[in-house]
Amino acid sequence: MGFGNGIMRIGRVELRVLDLEKSASYYKNVIGLEEVGRSQGRVYLKAWDEYDHHSLILKQADYAGLEHFAFKVKNEAVLNELEKKIEQFGCDTSRISYGTRMAEGQAVRFVLPTGHNVELYYEIERIGTKTGTLNPHPWPLDTRGIAPHRLDHVLLTGDDLKTVTRFFMEVLGFQQSEKITTVDGEELVGSFLFTTNKAHDLAFIKGPDSKLHHVAFYVESVHDVFRAADILTMNNVPTEVTPTRHGITRGQTVYFFDPSGNRNEAFASGYITYEDFPTITWTEDKIGQGIFYHRRELVESFGKALT
Ligand code: FE
């Protein structure tokens, strides 16, 4: 199926939120996404540099967390082929039909060994960007808030990281950019996975199944991370970790929480990967440095605040 097994990128995330209006306002005015539609208790949003109809769906619910996330594949043939491979691995799949959610075509849905709901899809309405594709300006003038380029990655927690890593690599054709192991190398406690050329499209750290650690939005530079942190303070948003560098991915980061307690990240740069990228290993005794390179230790809430 070629590069990335025909899976292009993480294309959307559906988050459960406790107060739809408050959350929509936060994602529009603080994060700076554009609202593109509403339907059946859901708000649909996109980042300014994304061409597809939406990348974030907010769903009103009684508890926060990740409803599902999805990867966009190249075409229907890839979707059908991957559906078979997922079933052969032993995961049950189902089809989400056209029109279930706004602007989306059909999707294949399944549950990861870590309990998270995932979909693969190839059809979604293309609405383009304000800068367009003909002699475009580099960015639109009328952005608000942090105004990230795109949805970048999710970090999830789960118990059996070996099996979920094997699933992504063997079935979906992902590669592992980095891993965190116990000092003896026996146990996997962190796994960072990519499909085409990012440092990670998703990652897992050891923890309870089915939980979300964070959703990350991409900004261009360390300066933009700093500016994001300014905007968080201006809006009184709870910030967990002020701007710093990740050892893992080498990106720059700030962590904070949405009004429902879902952790968000503004993430900048990080290296790019190719098909021959080797897996980088961090041992657990250096996990503080791996995650917060300057501080060299985890903050207490980091492993505990999950939704
Ligand atoms: Fe991240």
Image (tube, rainbow, N blue to C red):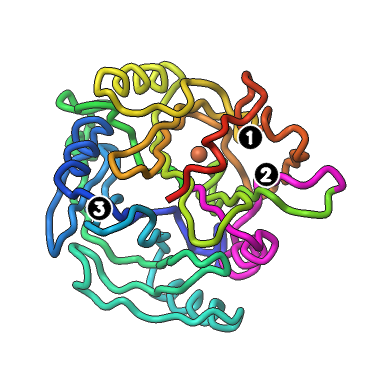
Mark 3 — residue? 58
Image location (x, y in percent) of residue 35: 16, 45
* Identity of the residue drawn at 49% across and 82% down: 92
Identify which amino acid the numbered label 1 is placed on.
Ile
Image location (x, y in percent) of residue 230: 33, 16
Q: Are marks 2 and 1 in contact (CB under 8 Å)?
A: yes
Disc 2 and disc 1: Cα gap in Å? Answer: 7 Å
Residues in magenta, as a range: 155-184
Mark 1 — residue? 248
Mark 2 — residue? 178
Identify which amino acid the numbered label 3 is placed on.
Leu
Q: Is mark 2 within 8 Å of ligand 1?
A: no
Disc 1 and disc 3: Cα gap in Å? Answer: 29 Å
Q: Are marks 1 and 3 in contact (CB under 8 Å)?
A: no
Q: Is residue 212 above or below residue 91?
A: above
Side of 271 relative to 282 (left or right): left
Identify which amino acid the numbered label 2 is placed on.
Glu
Quick one: label 3 or label 2, which is nearer the N terminus? 3
Select label 3 or label 2 by which is in front: 3
